Image (cartoon, rainbow, N blue to C red):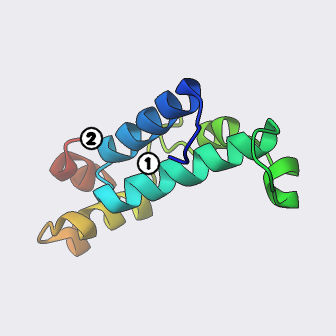
Amino acid sequence: MPRGSSPRRERQYEHVKESAGDRRESPKRAEEIASRTVDKERARSGESKTASRTSTRDMPSSKRGGQRSSSGAKGPTYDQLYEEAKRRGIHGRSSMNKSELKQSLGH
């Protein structure tokens, strides 16, 4: 967190970092996600000295995150499950169907 950050932004940073950790992101990646999210929110609200056009005109990260959620009506797609299985090193994933992947991943 940058020096002089408000307590609100520090809480936001910790919350986003925890959420990324819950999704099994590496600690370094979780910090990067949290930092970028907080920086963008600071730019959107005018708290930062400089801000890119994308940061100020793009959809807020809080709204975008909900739209990219993989917990829709049918849950994550086969490809998302397969990629998660690949990351976790689950053997036999290539011959599994969607329900078998869900079961092996504990979804």
Percent across and percent down for residue 9 are 57, 32
Percent across and percent down for residue 51 are 81, 55
Which comes before the other along the chain, label 1 or label 2?
1
Mark 1 neighbour density, 10 Å: few (under 14) some (14–19) many (20 or more): some
Q: Secondary structure at mark 1?
A: loop
Q: Give the residue pinned by disc 1.
A: 76
Q: Which mark is residue 107?
A: 2
Residue 89 in the figure: left or right of residue 30: left
Q: Hey, which quadrant is residue 96 in on the image?
A: bottom left
Percent across and percent down for residue 11 are 48, 28
Between the residue at mark 1 and the residue at mark 2, the CA separation in whole angstroms equals 9 Å
Q: Residue at x 31, y 41 (%)?
A: 22
Q: Nearer the viewer, residue 63 or 46?
A: 46
Q: Amino acid at mark 1?
A: Pro
- Contact between marks 1 and 2 (CB within 8 A): the answer is yes
Q: Is residue 95 above or below residue 36?
A: below
Direction top: furthest residue: 8
Residue 26 in the figure: left or right of residue 106: right
